[in-house]
Amino acid sequence: MRGLWNLTWLEIKIFAREPLGVVGTVLIPVVMFVLVGRMLGGRVTSSDRLRVFVGADLPVFTVMLIALNAVLSLVTIIAIYRESGILKRLRATPLRPHTILTAHVLAKLVFTVLTLALLAAAGRRFYPVALDVPWFSFGVALLVSTVSILSIGFLVASLVPTARFAQPIGTLFFYPMLGVSGLFVPLESLSPALQTLGHALPLTYAVSLLRGIWLGDSWLAHGWDVAGLIAVFVICTALSARVFRWQ
Amino acid sequence: MATGPVIQVTHLRKRYGSTVAVDDVSFEVNEGEIFGLIGPNGAGKTTTMECVEGVRTPDDGHISVLGLDPIRDIYELQPRVGVQLQEAHLQKRIKVREAVALWASLYRSTLDPRQLLEQLGLGDKRDAWFMTLSGGQKQRLFIALALINNPEVVFLDELTTGLDPQARHAIWDLVRGIRARGKTIFLTTHLMEEAERLCDRVAIIDHGHIVDINSPSGLIRKHCPQRSVIVTTDDRSADARLRAIAGVEVTRADDGVLTVRGDSAELMTGVIQCLADHRIRVTDFQTVVPTLEDVFLKLTGRTIRE
């Protein structure tokens, strides 16, 4: 793992230098979150449905979007690095392939955690609903979910032909998954075919785990979700290690 | 180090699908020399070099670098070699000193990064982003990255492609400086002038085959021994006097310009002697010596830029 911390820290600094890099990934979600909270604030007390939405679905939805955004950004960066020969150049050094990839994942995780920490701080200050959430458990659940989703991102990054296609293909790949994940519509109300599809896709397990832990479920109740996410991680990592192209 | 070649390639083959990029290539690179693999784009230069660097896996053949196998022993080999890849890039917003520091962190023993950047003329660019560097500065940075681990062998792939003549000359001086420090250099180029000025020995490669290997002057002597002297004179007797020199061929153009051709190394001396002996007044005197470009044309039947 020689060079891992150097490379991770470097990638964080380089990303922070991107125009709109930090503003886009960290500040905009927080600002949006505060604005939506303000808009809904007055109405929450008058509606139970809204209270459930703001109290449970909105946070999970926000978290999922931030995680997906990190994954899409990862897919794009890997594609750009490959296309412009940066990956090839890094590979001709004693850096091990998995070190380069791990550094990128860590850099993305740092920004995801930063965004979420700011969200949590803003939530305490501005959120219309008082929350009693097991933050530590939720953090762990989020880490498991994000790493699992990132591994799918790597598989996509291994397969997209050029940087120009990375973002659209990534979007086409991930957002429909979100549609049948049970986040917007409960899985039970979908047609049997879509339910089967939903159960086959990893985001469903992430949503179920995050929402459950947010609402105070025990880890035991979500053993299958965790097992599913770990299985996805193992399969995707193994697959992308086989098909990953450096140039 | 034990005597014997630093790099040894025997019967190397590499194909991409149905295209054979490198076909039965064999050569050796000796310690302390600048060895050039020259040929047009698509001849197999980069593929060959990347196989030797361990970046690409050959289909067939045997490669040894410093006695190691570039694929099997890659992690043992990497600290001892420096690599500059063709058309490489770094992160747009990485600073020059950050790139060098990252590279330095990967090796056990390194040169002093600050001093290295000074030597390569990048001292005042330490805090510049990669994307703001000129072509020549980028290439010098890549040379710095290739040298940071104080390697025994340096690989330089199309080092000066796309640079202006001034930057090119500056880079050539740098490369000679690397050899002066006792390193072995293996480079590729499609610029015959670069090969002729820089390389101790060159291998001409075309369509994946090595056509010949020798020193640039050796190749010229062997394949294009003929030199010419072009004499402009009003003296009517000059034609006959010059024809009298042994082993030459003289042609006369309508405007009185005489071209004297011959294979002998003594041709120039012979012509000058003849002109002086017979007090022939000349208004112009040019010599035409064949270059590696001519050798290439002769061996492959086409110019390198075709």
Image: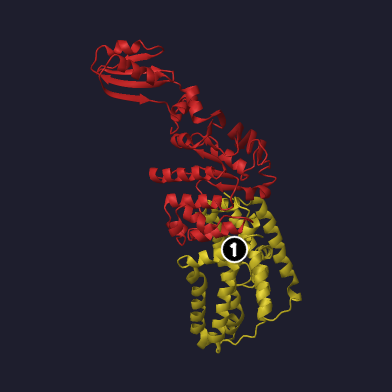
Vertical placement of residue B36 versus A236, above or below: above
Q: Nearer the viewer, residue B255 or B172?
A: B172
Q: Nearer the viewer, residue A234 or A38?
A: A234
Vertical placement of residue B183 versus A200, above or below: above
Q: Nearer the viewer, residue B4 or A54?
A: B4
Reading the image, the residue beneath label 1 is: A6
Vertical placement of residue B247 versus A110, above or below: above
Chain in red in the render: B
Vertical placement of residue A174 versus A114, above or below: above
Q: Is residue B160 at least partly visible in the picture?
A: no
Q: Residue at x 66, y 39 (%)?
A: B64
Given the image, what chain letter belongs to the residue carrying mark 1?
A
Question: Where's residue A10, x and y in %?
Answer: 55, 64
What is the secondary structure assignment of the residue under circle 1? helix
Seen as rendered, the residue at the extreme left is B234
Chain in yellow in the render: A
Question: Where's residue A63, x and y in %?
Answer: 59, 73
Q: Residue at x 61, y 60 (%)?
A: A153
Task: Give the quarter of the image for residue A224.
Answer: bottom right
Question: Where's residue B275, x and y in %?
Answer: 31, 17
